[in-house]
Amino acid sequence: MARLDQVITNIVDIFMEYADDGGKKRQLNKEELKKLFEQEIQSPDLKDKISAGDIEEAMEMLDKNHDGEVNFREFCRCVSDLAKCYYQKKTGRGGKRGKGKSQEGEEGEG
Ligand SMILES: [Ca+2]
Ligand SMILES: [Ca+2]
């Protein structure tokens, strides 16, 4: 399988594996979310970002529709946020906004 194929199937598989573990299917509750972070994220930088230690906070951050659980859409956002963090770290572009040439506003929020 090609790499991007793998990434995509992994995201879906990981979500389903943990979300269907207990409670509601296709929804990650706090415990499932915690387990997912603990087992599927090893990089210290990302772990630091997601703070599985403070799952309440992580849940609040991810649970955009405030139903107390993380659905697939919310999980995808989380993965993409983590990818952006890693990218910024790699390119050393974290925290230097608004300098230089103007950008096409690709910072679409919500
Ligand atoms: Ca569940
Ligand atoms: Ca939710």
Image: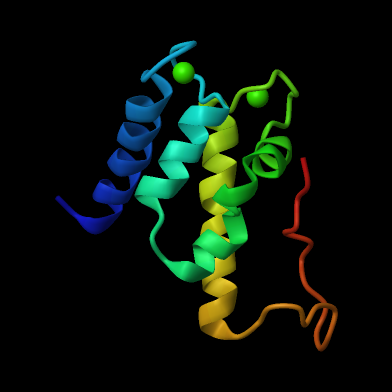
Residue furthest to the front in view is: 53
Q: Quick check: 77 above or below 49?
A: above
Q: Image check: 40 left or right of 2?
A: right
Percent x, y of residue 74 = 60, 34
Q: Quadrant of the C terminus?
A: top right
Colour theme: rainbow
Picture quarter containing residue 104?
Answer: bottom right
Q: In which image quadrant can residue 68 be found?
A: top right
- Which residue is the extreme one toward the left? 1
Quarter of the image for residue 101 reads bottom right
- Rendered view: 80 above or below 63: below
Query: Who's the residue at 75% across and 50% down the image?
Result: 108
The residue positioned farthest toward the top in the image shown: 24
User: Count the marks: how many?
Assistant: 0
Residue 13: x %, y % from top left: 30, 33
Q: Does residue 101 appear left or right of residue 74 in this picture?
A: right
Residue at horizontal 24%, vertical 57%? 3
Percent position of residue 59, x then y: 66, 36
Which of these two is toward me, 20 or 93? 20
Q: Is residue 73 above or below residue 41?
A: above
Name the residue nearer the viewer: 1 or 87.
87
Q: Residue at x 74, y 24 (%)?
A: 65
When the figure is inspected, residue 59 is found, relative to residue 81, above or below; the finding is: above
Query: Residue at position x 51%, y 81% from top?
Result: 90
